[in-house]
């Protein structure tokens, strides 16, 4: 499923939602390749849940290997409501158990092409994406 926001001129900002279930059964390297393929189409990926640390590392590695005149890299940010500093200990334990059973479905990860996403600011309660789409 994807959504488009119409900007001035004929430029489109495309957000593509990627449900965790769509990548859950894929090996880590294929998950990363699938995400990177979407981002290379100048789409911002809204991923349900979070990538593992090793997957983030692999995503950055593959990105660095792919940089050229047309692909400038990625910006990445994740938010996890379970990491709020003021969350109760019992709630953290419950969410940890759910995470063990269901995988990394908690939170959201945003990955976008660096040519469009200029900055991602995040804290435990919100995530902000700053874009720069050139107008004609």
Image: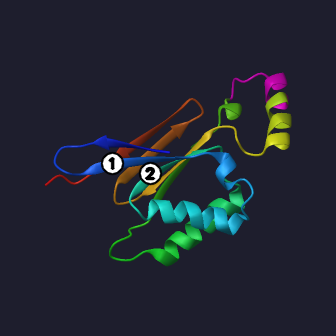
Kindly check if marks 1 and 2 are in contact, taking CB atoms under 8 A apart as contact: yes
Q: Which mark is residue 13?
A: 1
Residue that appears at 71% across and 62% down: 54
63 sits left or right of 97 in the view: left
In this orientation, which residue lies closer to the viewer: 46 or 61?
46
Q: Which residue is at 61% across, 64% downward?
A: 32
Name the residue beneath numbered marker 2.
44
Question: SS for tag 2?
Answer: strand
Q: Residue at x 86, y 35 (%)?
A: 97
Quadrant assignment, res 83: top right
The tally of labels here is 2
Question: Could you say where residue 79 lies in the image, as x and y percent from the top left?
Answer: 59, 39
Residue 16: x %, y % from top left: 47, 48
Secondary structure found at label 1:
strand
Q: Is residue 62 left or right of residue 23?
A: left
Residue 45, placed above or below residue 26 = above
Q: Residue 103 in the image: state x and y as whole percent.
A: 77, 45
Check the picture and name the quadrant holding the C terminus: bottom left
Residue 38 circle label: none
Residue nearer the viewer, 20 or 59: 20
Does residue 106 appear in this view? yes
Q: Is residue 127 magenta?
A: no
Q: Residue furthest front?
A: 1
Instruction: Point out residue 45 in the picture as x, y percentages from the top left corner.
Output: 50, 51
**Separation (CA) of disc 1 from disc 2:** 8 Å
Magenta extent? 85-93
Upstream in sequence: badge 1 or badge 2 = 1
Write down the quadrant of residue 91 in the picture. Answer: top right
Picture colour scheme: rainbow
């Amino acid at each position: 499923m994807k959504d488009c926001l119409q900007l001035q001129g004929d430029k489109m900002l495309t957000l593509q939602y990627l449900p965790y279930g769509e990548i859950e059964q894929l090996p880590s390297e294929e998950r990363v390749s699938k995400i990177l393929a979407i981002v290379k189409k100048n789409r911002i990926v809204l991923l349900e849940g979070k990538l593992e640390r090793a997957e983030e590392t692999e995503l950055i590695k593959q990105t660095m290997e792919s940089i050229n005149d047309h692909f400038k890299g990625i910006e990445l940010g994740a938010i996890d409501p379970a990491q709020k500093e003021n969350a109760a200990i019992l709630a953290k334990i419950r969410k940890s158990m759910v995470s063990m059973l269901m995988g990394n479905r908690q939170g959201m990860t945003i990955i976008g092409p660096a040519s469009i996403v200029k900055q991602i600011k995040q804290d435990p309660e919100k995530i902000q994406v700053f874009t720069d789409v050139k107008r004609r």
